[in-house]
Image (cartoon, rainbow, N blue to C red):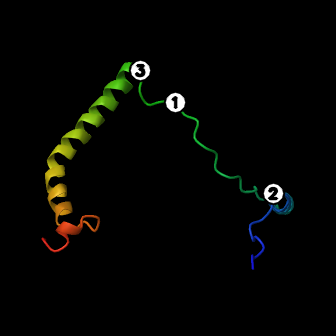
Amino acid sequence: MNQPCRRPTLANIQEQRRQKKQQEKALNAKLRALGTVPHAPATLPNGCSAFATIAEEREARADAVSKQARLLRQELPALLAQLERIPDPRDPGSAGTS
């Protein structure tokens, strides 16, 4: 009683892509004929790092990690205390102790 797979095949996916490209080309041609600029998809950023040197970037990353570690040291005891209140279903001896 297996049901056929509903997942599209590679050929179907490629056909859908072809149809989409044809529709986009037709729409862009229509927009150009009307005198408007066709919409272009946003490009991915290809920028350089904001840091001038590798040492600056290394220092900034180290600073971020140290701040995160400091925050974890402050918050971890409270988090562990909250987690201790959750009963552990794996341990049958502690099921009714909390």
Earlier sequence position, callout 3 versus callout 2: 2
The residue singled out by tag 1 in the image is: 48
Q: Is residue 59 left or right of residue 15?
A: left
Vertically, is 7 above or below 17?
A: below
Crowd tier of the residue under label 2, counting other residues whose Cα lies within 10 Å: few below 14, some 14–19, many 20 or above: few
Crowd tier of the residue under label 3, counting other residues whose Cα lies within 10 Å: few below 14, some 14–19, many 20 or above: few
Query: Which residue is situated farthest in the front direction here?
Result: 93
Total labels: the figure holds: 3
Tell me the element at label 1: loop
Q: Is residue 51 left or right of residue 41?
A: left
* Rendering quarter of residue 19: bottom right
Foreground mark, 1 or 2, reads 2
Earlier sequence position, callout 3 versus callout 1: 1
Q: Is residue 54 left or right of residue 46?
A: left
Q: CA distance from mark 1 to mark 2?
A: 37 Å
The amino acid type found where label 3 is placed reads Ile
The residue at 58%/36% (across/down) is: 46
Nearest the eye: 8 or 23: 8
Q: Position of residue 7 (x, y in %)?
A: 74, 67
The residue singled out by tag 2 in the image is: 10
Mark on residue 54? 3
Earlier sequence position, callout 1 versus callout 2: 2
Is the N terminus in the top left, top right, bottom left or bottom right quadrant? Answer: bottom right
Q: CA distance from mark 3 to mark 1?
A: 12 Å
